[in-house]
Amino acid sequence: GAGVSQSPSNKVTEKGKDVELRCDPISGHTALYWYRQSLGQGLEFLIYFQGNSAPDKSGLPSDRFSAERTGGSVSTLTIQRTQQEDSAVYLCASGDNRGETQYFGPGTRLLVL
Amino acid sequence: QKEVEQNSGPLSVPEGAIASLNCTYSDRGSQSFFWYRQYSGKSPELIMSIYSNGDKEDGRFTAQLNKASQYVSLLIRDSQPSDSATYLCAVNRDGNNRLAFGKGNQVVVIP
C-alpha cells in the first residue's frame, strides 16, 4: 500500500517568511510524528499525535513552530518567521495505535536563505 | 549524557565481512529498541526491532540487547556494498512512543 507522503519535497524560503509542511500518513495509522534532521545530525523529535489525544509538543524548539492534525489523518507543520537555523530535513512518520514501529516519509528539505 | 549514543566514527568493512555497530542508552526504563538504515539523501528505513535481552536474527542482520548494561548492537553478516549507509539506533522510553535517536554510524562496504 501507499507509504507516508510529504509535500513539498523541497522548499526554499527567505528568512522571516512562514512555511507549511504537509504529511499524509499511512492509511489507518493513528500515530503521527514530526522529526527534524539537520546536516550530519541525528533525528530530533518535534511533536507526536496519537488518535484524538492531546499532542505531545515537548520537542518543538520554539513558539514559532506549531503543528496540527485534522481529522486524525493529514498533518501540517507550520514554521513562522523562519530563521536560517531552521534549515533542515523535516521528516514525518506514522505508526499504528501502539505507535512503536514508525514508518518514515521521504521528508521535506527546507532551506532558509 | 545523551539519551542515545553511537560513538564510533565511519566504519569501513570489506565485502563479505561482519560489520558491528554499538549503541548505548541512558534511560534504564527503556523498553523498545530499533535499528534504522538511512541511505544518503533518503529517509530512515526500519530494519530491526528488539524488545527482550538476547539476540534477534533476521536474514543477515542480528540485533543484540543487554538491558543490564544498557547497550544494543547490530551485526551485519556477509556485508554487501548495498549495506553502505548510515545506521541509526533508536530507543522508545517508557512506552511513551517518543523515539530518541542516536546520531548514527556510517558504514562503508568496500568491494
Image (cartoon, coloured by chain):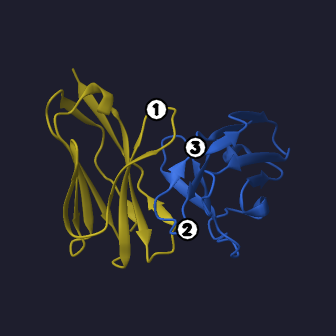
Chain colours: A blue, B yellow
Residue shown at 48%/63% (left/top)?
Answer: B99
Q: What residue type is labelled 1?
A: Ser
What's the CA distance linking mark 1 and mark 2?
A: 30 Å
Q: In which quarter of the image is the C terminus of chain A?
A: top right
10 Å crowding of disc 3: few (<14), some (14-19), many (20+): some
- Is residue A99 placed above or below B104 in the rendered structure? below
Residue shown at 62%/58% (left/top)?
Answer: A28
Mark 2 lies on residue = A97
Asked if one can make out residue B57 in the rendered structure from this viewpoint, the answer is yes
**In x, y percent, where is residue A70?**
79, 60
Q: Quadrant of the N terminus of chain A?
A: top right
Of residues B46 and A11, the one drawn nearer to the viewer in this rendering:
B46
Q: What residue type is labelled 2?
A: Asn
Residue shown at 51%/35% (left/top)?
Answer: B42
Q: Mark 3 lies on which chain?
A: A
Asked if one can make out residue A113 in the rendered structure from this viewpoint, the answer is no
Q: Image quadrant of residue B9?
A: top left
What's the CA distance linking mark 3 and mark 2?
A: 16 Å
Q: Are callouts 1 and 2 both on one chain?
A: no
What's the CA distance linking mark 3 and mark 1?
A: 19 Å
